Image: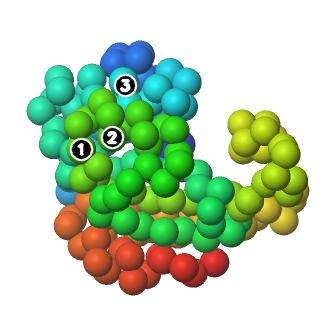
C-alpha cells in the first residue's frame, strides 16, 4: 500500500475507521487505500467499518498480506478462499461475513525453527537477500494492480502466481 500511495502521490494519513486512509484513482477506478491501525488479528474491524460506510461489497475489497506458506518473494493471487491459518484474514472473513474478496499473498517463507513464535518471525529482521526478493514481489504486485482493479483477475493470476 505504501508503494502504491508513493507512486501515485497519495498521502495515507487521515485516521478514520481505525485505519490510516487515503483516496486515489488507480487505473481509472476510485479507490480507498486503507492501513488498519488495529492489531493484525483484528484488521477485519477496520476494513468492515470502511466497507459498511462506503457500501463496498467484499468482492471489491483487495487485500494484500504476508504468507508463511509461500517461499520468500513468491506471489499468489486468489479471488476468494479460506484464511489458511492467517489470523488477519480470519478477522476479515469474520467481520465481512464472507471469504469472497480478492487477495494478494506475499510469501515470507517458513519459520527457520518450528518452535519459534510466528509473530516473532514475521515481525523480525530479514536478510538483505530476502529484502530484495520482497521488494521485487511488491513491485510485481503493484504492476498487476491495474489488472486487479479492472476485473482481469485471471490475467493477474497468470502473470503473478508462482513466479519469483
**What secondary structure is found at the residue carrying circle 3?**
helix
The residue sitting at 55% across, 24% down in the picture is 39
From mark 3 to mark 2, how far is it between C-alphas? Answer: 12 Å
Q: Which mark is residue 46?
A: 3
The residue sitting at 37% across, 65% down in the picture is 78
From the top left corner, tell me how far across and down residue 129 is, in percent.
84, 65
From mark 1 to mark 2, how far is it between C-alphas? Answer: 5 Å
* Residue 140 in view, yes or no: yes
From the top left corner, tell me how far across and down residue 158 is, in percent.
39, 83
**What secondary structure is found at the residue carrying circle 1?**
loop
From mark 1 to mark 3, how far is it between C-alphas? Answer: 15 Å
Q: Earlier in the sequence, mark 1 or mark 3?
A: 3
Q: How is the image coloured?
A: rainbow
From the top left corner, tell me how far across and down residue 55 is, in percent.
12, 32
Q: Residues within 10 Å of mark 2 (few under 14, many from 20)?
A: many
The residue sitting at 72% across, 37% down in the picture is 119
| Label 1 close to label 2 by CB (< 8 Å) | yes
Above or below, 152 against 103 in this view is below
Q: Is residue 123 left or right of residue 116?
A: left
**What secondary structure is found at the residue carrying circle 2?**
helix
Q: Earlier in the sequence, mark 1 or mark 2?
A: 2
Near-viewer residue (122 or 126)? 122
| Label 3 close to label 2 by CB (< 8 Å) | no
Near-viewer residue (70 or 56)? 70
Q: Which mark is residue 89?
A: none
Residue that badge 2 annotates = 93
Residue that badge 1 annotates = 98
Residue 98: image quadrant is: top left
Amino acid at each position: 500500500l505504501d508503494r502504491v500511495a508513493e507512486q501515485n502521490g497519495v498521502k495515507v494519513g487521515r485516521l478514520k475507521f481505525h485505519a490510516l486512509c487515503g483516496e486515489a484513482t488507480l487505473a481509472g477506478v476510485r479507490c480507498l487505500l486503507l492501513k488498519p491501525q488495529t492489531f493484525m488479528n483484528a484488521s477485519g474491524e477496520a476494513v468492515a467499518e470502511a466497507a459498511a460506510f462506503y457500501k463496498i461489497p467484499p468482492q471489491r475489497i483487495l487485500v494484500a498480506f504476508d504468507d508463511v506458506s509461500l517461499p520468500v518473494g513468491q506471489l499468489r493471487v486468489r479471488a476468494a478462499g479460506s484464511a489458511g491459518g492467517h489470523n488477519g484474514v480470519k478477522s476479515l472473513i469474520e467481520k465481512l461475513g464472507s471469504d469472497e474478496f480478492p487477495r494478494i499473498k506475499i510469501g515470507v517463507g517458513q519459520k527457520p525453527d518450528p518452535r519459534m513464535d510466528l509473530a516473532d518471525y514475521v515481525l523480525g529482521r530479514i536478510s538483505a537477500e530476502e529484502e530484495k526478493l520482497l521488494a521485487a514481489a511488491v513491485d510485481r504486485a503493484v504492476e498487476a494492480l491495474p489488472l486487479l482493479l479492472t476485473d482481469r483477475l485471471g490475467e493477474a493470476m497468470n502473470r503473478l502466481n508462482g513466479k519469483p
